[in-house]
């Protein structure tokens, strides 16, 4: 796991791949809410394949009010899904949040992302009412975990 700048070229490529996938799954509304930027992301991590060193995933933290963070840009390349990279990114983001004194992690995923829903539920996240910019969006599924 490696922290990098938001504009790191590998991170930019992975986020672009994620955006293309979301646009295909949600052609009318690929991303509800405010887009993450270098100005509002406090941590951005890349994960690489342990054997090849090839970057296979990423994730970010955005500070929310009080002691909460929002997990953003969780993405694993399709050929690597189901091999633990997503769990590794999520665990590293939670550790980074704890290191910043945060006590709650929240996130939003979508109804057309069953693999993400499974990951979050198996990782101890509880479904909550849609928060912030996701409220009222029927495709948003929100989760929270006490860290």
Image: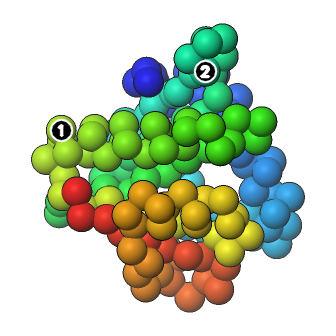
Q: Quadrant of the C terminus?
A: bottom left
> Is the residue under label 2 in contact with that under label 1 (CB below 8 Å)?
no
The answer to whether 145 appears left or right of 109 in the picture is: left
Q: How busy is the neighbourhood of tag 1: few (under 14 within 10 Å), some, or many (20 plus)?
A: few
The answer to whether 29 appears left or right of 57 in the picture is: right
Residue drawn at point x = 85 percent, y = 67 percent? 27
Name the spot of residue 16 as percent of width and height, x first.
Answer: 72, 38
Of the two numbered discs 1 and 2 on the same chain, state the one appearing first in sequence. 2
Residue 30 location, quadrant: bottom right
Q: Nearer the viewer, mark 1 or mark 2?
A: 2
Q: Quadrant of the N terminus?
A: top left
Q: Answer above or below: position of 33 versus 90.
A: below
Kindly identify which residue carries mark 1: 99
Residue drawn at point x = 66 percent, y = 16 percent? 54
Name the spot of residue 71 as percent of width and height, x first.
Answer: 43, 53
Q: Gap between marks 1 and 2, in whole Å?
A: 25 Å
């Amino acid at each position: 796991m490696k922290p990098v700048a938001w504009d790191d070229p590998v991170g930019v490529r992975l986020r672009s791949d994620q955006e293309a996938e979301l646009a295909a799954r949600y052609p009318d509304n690929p991303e509800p809410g405010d887009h993450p930027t270098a100005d509002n992301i406090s941590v951005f991590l890349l994960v690489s394949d342990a054997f090849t060193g090839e970057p296979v995933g990423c994730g970010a933290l955005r500070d929310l009010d009080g002691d909460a963070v929002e997990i953003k840009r969780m993405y694993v390349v399709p050929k690597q899904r189901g091999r633990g990279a997503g769990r590794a990114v999520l665990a590293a983001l939670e550790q980074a949040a704890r290191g910043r004194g945060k006590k709650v992690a929240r996130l939003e995923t979508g109804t057309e992302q069953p693999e993400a829903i499974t990951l979050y539920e198996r990782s101890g996240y509880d479904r909550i009412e849609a928060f912030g910019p996701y409220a009222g969006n029927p495709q948003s599924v929100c989760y929270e975990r006490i860290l």
